[in-house]
């Protein structure tokens, strides 16, 4: 009888060992990753989804999304080691990198400018902007760089045409300044543009539709985080890409709108429709940072800070985590035929 029981005991022991493996992995303390996000925008939807749907948890990560006011502060926190990852405009990174900070961009959150140059109703053509006031958020940030790009695209020069570029806060503040006639023009994102155009203001130039190469927002980290803690970074990237796939899956539309509404503090998911469409239209399924768009940013930032001019876009990008996922077929697995 004892001899007959032994195989059963062995099987039970093996079963116990196999079953305790995942449980022990799940009980391991999650790896904390602090991420600073500088603007509340629909481009952050994959972050919010990955957090809300516990996709980060699935990969053993305790991701803390920290909202800060402005990309400059986010990049300063990154340089100081207070966070591991910053979601910010490359324009706010370049001066730090030119000053010796070992920072690289590893994911392209927004690979095109989301801004439209919106003007007072009486301003219908580029020449009408001469001698006028143009509102952006912060000097050196994405809206400011987009303003300079827009003016050049329209054949205008801020100095030569006496166009005054002002720091006037985020979209709501710029919209209010337009209505108070404290500004003649402003750089506005999709939903703000829709509201103002509905009131009769002029959408003089949509930079997204103009297809001007521009790297708007990236995920950046210190080089030693990418090289020395590759497992954490790889897991973070893998989880975030799953957040992208969840966002793009039309079956999840209502759930995604609810996540957007919660994070943008809207009254209901119904109010998130335009923000949802913005995310669908402006996010990339494979969020690689773009070399050409980064070159555009370097060009315009270098006009204000000549030390930035020698930087090479190719050397500022390290997409090794994305390439690894690409090579293993991770994107195809997530997206399938969708």
Image (cartoon, helix red, strand yellow):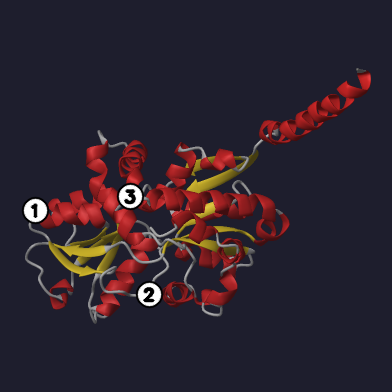
The relative height of residue 126 versus residue 174 in the rendered view (above or below) is: below
Upstream in sequence: badge 2 or badge 1? 1
Q: Residue at 81% of width from left, 30% of height from top? A: 11
Residue 2 percent across, percent down from the top left: 92, 19
Task: Examine the image and state in which quarter residue 223 appears.
Answer: bottom right
Upstream in sequence: badge 2 or badge 3? 2
Q: Residue at 28% of width from left, 72% of height from top? A: 150
Q: Are marks 2 and 1 in contact (CB under 8 Å)?
A: no
Q: Is residue 226 shown left or right of residue 128? A: right
Marks 3 and 1, how far apart at CA: 31 Å
- Badge 2: few (under 14), some or many (20 or more) residues near its Cα, within 10 Å? some
- Element type where label 2 sits in the image: loop
Report whether residue 258 is seen: yes
Residue highlighted by disc 3: 250
Residue 74 percent across, percent down from the top left: 50, 51
Q: Quadrant of the C terminus?
A: bottom left
Upstream in sequence: badge 3 or badge 1? 1
Residue highlighted by disc 2: 213
Foreground tag (2 vs 1): 2
Camera-side residue: 310 or 52? 52
Camera-side residue: 28 or 23? 23
Residue highlighted by disc 1: 199
- Element type where label 3 sits in the image: helix
Residue 295 percent across, percent down from the top left: 46, 77
Task: Examine the image and state in which quarter residue 118 appears.
Answer: bottom left
- Badge 3: few (under 14), some or many (20 or more) residues near its Cα, within 10 Å? few
Residue 285 percent across, percent down from the top left: 42, 61
The relative height of residue 200 versus residue 11 in the rendered view (above or below) is: below
The relative height of residue 280 versus residue 24 in the rendered view (above or below) is: below
């Amino acid at each position: 009888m004892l001899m007959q029981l032994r195989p059963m005991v062995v099987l039970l022991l093996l079963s116990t060992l196999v079953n305790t493996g995942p449980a022990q992995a799940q009980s391991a303390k999650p790896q904390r990753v602090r991420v600073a996000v500088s603007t509340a925008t629909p481009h952050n939807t994959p972050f919010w989804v990955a957090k809300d749907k516990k996709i980060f948890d699935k990969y053993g990560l305790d991701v803390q999304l920290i909202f800060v006011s402005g990309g400059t502060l986010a990049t300063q926190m990154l340089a100081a080691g207070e966070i591991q990852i910053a979601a910010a405009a490359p324009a706010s990174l370049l001066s730090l990198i030119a000053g010796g900070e070992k920072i690289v961009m590893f994911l392209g959150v927004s690979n095109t400018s989301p801004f439209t140059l919106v003007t007072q109703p009486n301003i219908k053509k580029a020449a009408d902007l001469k001698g006028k006031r143009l509102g952006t958020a912060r000097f050196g940030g994405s809206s400011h760089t987009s303003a300079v790009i827009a003016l050049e695209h329209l054949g205008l020069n801020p100095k030569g045409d006496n166009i005054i570029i002002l720091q006037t806060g985020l979209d709501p503040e710029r919209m209010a300044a337009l209505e108070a006639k404290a500004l003649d023009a402003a750089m506005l994102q999709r939903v703000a543009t829709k509201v103002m155009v509905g009131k009769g203001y002029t959408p003089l130039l949509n930079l997204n539709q103009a297809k001007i190469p521009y790297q708007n927002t990236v995920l950046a980290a210190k080089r030693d985080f990418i090289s020395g803690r590759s497992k954490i970074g790889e897991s973070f990237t893998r989880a975030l890409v799953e957040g992208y796939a969840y966002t793009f899956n039309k079956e999840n539309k209502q759930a995604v709108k609810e996540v957007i509404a919660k994070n943008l503090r809207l009254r209901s998911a119904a109010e998130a429709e335009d923000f949802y469409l913005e995310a669908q239209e402006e996010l990339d399924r494979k969020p690689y940072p773009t070399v050409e768009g980064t070159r555009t940013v370097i060009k315009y930032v270098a006009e204000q800070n000549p030390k930035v001019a020698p930087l090479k876009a190719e050397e500022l990008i390290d997409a090794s985590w994305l390439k690894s996922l690409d090579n293993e077929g991770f994107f195809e697995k997530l997206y399938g035929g969708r």
